[in-house]
Amino acid sequence: MHRTSLFLGLLALMTSFAAQGGDPPLPAQLEGVGVVERLGEKVDLNLTFVSESGRVVRLGDYFRKERPVILNLVYYSCPMLCTLVLNGQTAALRQIPGTPGREFEILTISIDPTETPELAREKKQSYIGELGRGGEGWHFLTDREGNVRRLADQAGFHYTYDKQSGQYAHSAAIIVLTPEGAISRYLYGIEFKPRDVRLALAEASQGKSGATLDRLLLFCYHYDPASRSYVPFAANIMRAGGALTMIGLAMMLGIFWRRERRLAVVRSALPPA
């Protein structure tokens, strides 16, 4: 228990330093841990895993029907960080429109090869209950063949196993992919802004899915790597505002012209004075 607390404390300390922009010496337990963004690169959709029902499945089975995919690389027995990431993701998803299996898919895959489909099924039931929506599109997978390590390397998600604590050291992040399996966006932390999740899904869908409002929001916001968040794009907001002004003006003129035409018809029907 003491080792567990110490290990988690190190992770929390590193997160704090990172948030403050510091560069502390890296503890040995965290050597090799981190995220190297591979935006635009595709993951291998032929990798196989085991579903929560015990079936062998291809990664590509979940990239279909032009839906973007949220990828979580976690482990189900994680005492703290993975749970916080999944809780934060669920909280954000509850505040945006869309249901897994309709507008997008979610893949939660265990990085611990000893974990079982039974444990994955328990986690799925818990989080589907928290989300409060249909669970057909949220999939909890396990690994038997080392494919999760291959997938993580392709996604730039690097983690290590600490023998002393018996736990995995990893980053707090979710990865959003396009329907073709290309990496579109990384979102970091244990709390996610609903707007960021919504825009990341809209961006990953490449206009193939999502509401018109999402596409309009994406026009007015862009991803800022420095803040790791979507921020207003002033030029596009001005363009959108100008366009809306022109549309409003055109509507007003249209109403005025129709009114004038009706009055002209009425006047022409009146007998001359």
Image (tube, helix red, strand yellow):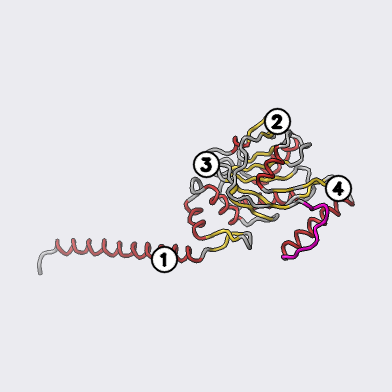
Q: Between marks 2 and 1, how big is the CA–CA gap?
A: 55 Å
Q: Is residue 136 left or right of residue 117?
A: left
The disc at residue 66 is 3
Pointers 2 and 4 in contact (C-beta within 8 Å)? no
Residue under label 4, please give it. Answer: 165
Q: Between marks 1 and 3, how big is the CA–CA gap?
A: 32 Å
Pointers 1 and 3 in contact (C-beta within 8 Å)? no
SS label for mark 3: loop
SS label for mark 1: helix
The disc at residue 242 is 1
> What residue type is disc 2 on?
Gly
Residue 29: within the magenta? Answer: yes
SS label for mark 2: loop
Along the line of sight, which residue is nearer the eye, 140 or 113? Answer: 113
Along the line of sight, which residue is nearer the eye, 248 or 227? Answer: 227
> What residue type is disc 4 on?
Ser
Q: In percent of the image, x 69 and y 56: which residue is there? A: 189
* Foreground disc of the pair 1, 4: 4
Within 10 Å of the Cα at label 2, are there few (<14), some (14-19), or many (20+) other Cα atoms?
Answer: some
List x then y, in percent, for residue 205.
53, 47
Q: Between marks 3 and 2, how big is the CA–CA gap?
A: 26 Å
Q: Residue furthest right?
A: 2
